[in-house]
Image (tube, rainbow, N blue to C red):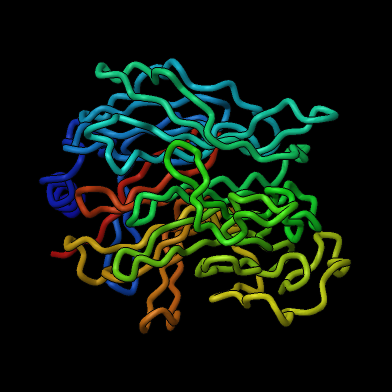
Amino acid sequence: MFLRKTLLAAMCATTLLPLAAVYAADVQSFTSEQGRITATPIVKGLDHPWAVAFLPDKRGLLVTERPGHLRFVSPDGKLSAPLTGVPQVWAKGQGGLLDVVLSPDFKQDRMVYLSYAEGGGEGGKAGTAVGRGRLADDLSGLKDFKVILRQEPKLSTGNHFGSRLAFDRDGYLFVTLGENNDRPTAQDLDKLQGKVVRIFPDGRVPDDNPFVGQEGVRPEIWSYGQRNPQGLALNPWSGTLWENEHGPRGGDEINIIERGKNYGWPLATHGINYSLTPIPEAKGKTVEGTVAPHHVWEKSPAISGMAFYDADRFKAWQHNLFIGALASQELIRLQFDGDKVIHEERLLGGLKARIRDVRQGPDGFLYVLTDADDGVLYRVGLNQD
């Protein structure tokens, strides 16, 4: 009991949420290479949460639920009713309301960006869409929501929407788009399946995108040959864009995304079909003209959200990368020498939960979402006593 009270007191001093919001009896502690890790439930009862975004000035956070709800979590840990003004989503299979990020100029424009699965395709199929709306001053909803990007054609029957969002240092918006489980489209430059795209915040296409002006090529494309990218983060100390994606059976990978490059899927892969048969289009693990993965897992953890750690609170985690894992139900910690991965540690396996997203909070803690119909937002930190 003394240890638990000590951990709670240490964690709740100067954190995002006060002690009153903590489910004290449910704090869990785990071993790690850097010491004891505590996972503190902040919000429970979330319906398949997918992503979290922190409001400035410790005013709380926004969290998406895949069935189509955007929620506000107040600084005292209260969960709001669903916000108004959120677009209707195609909530089937892996589809629904997905990522959420704030505008880099949120304090001035209050813009909230959402990615989601959108129906209306031929034969009832769906694709990824991205839009933005202005968060009301009373935090009750989004105003004037407008779609700024649509994945065309819509080819998904419920799989591989991708759908992470990230702004770079110059204010461009990057969006990951899955190949809708239609493998060859990842190599088709007239389609937005299996791509990372780069747009202005209002959806316009920058003139210096790599394929602008080429006939039969979508000008939004920044890179291609992606399968189902569910992690995207800007490296805070280099400014490079990192992406992770699900392989098939085996071959989950991390890529450093560069302008106009082909990342290989389905021509190059470390995986096979779930039926244990080879990928029909595959020519090997590496293929000339494509970029090999920066890091690869031969056995798929089913990786999802990712976050670089650059806060001062936990020195042992600085310059580490954290990635959620759905199938292996863990938080993966990667250490680097420069950009090279030199060590991996699996954390939070004791939660026995699918980890969908991980973000660094403004208080220097990690925040982790579990993907379930009774999903939980955890605050995760090291005991430094």
Residue 43 visible from this viewpoint: yes
Residue 262: x, y in percent? Answer: 65, 68
Tell me if residue 48 can be seen.
Answer: no
Quadrant of res 24: top left
Tell me where residue 211 sits by quadrant.
bottom right
Which residue sits at x=33%, y=74%? 33
The foreground one among 120 and 275 is 120
Q: Quadrant of the C terminus?
A: bottom left
Of the pair 17 and 292, the residue shown nearer to us? 292
Q: Position of residue 218 (x, y in %)?
A: 66, 50
Residue closer to the observer: 366 or 329: 366
Residue 377, placed above or below residue 240: above
Q: Position of residue 194 (x, y in %)?
A: 68, 54
Report the front residue among 79 and 306: 306
Q: Is residue 222 left or right of residue 312?
A: right
Q: Quadrant of residue 295?
A: bottom right
In the image: residue 271, left or right of residue 28: right
Question: Residue at coordinates 30% horizontally, 40% vertically from top-left?
Answer: 54
* Vertical position of residue 81 compared to residue 54: above or below: above
Q: Residue at x 65, y 30 (%)?
A: 118
Residue 40 pos. (x, y %): 30, 45
> In the displayed structure, would residue 166 be above or below residue 107?
below
Q: Residue at x 74, y 37 (%)?
A: 154
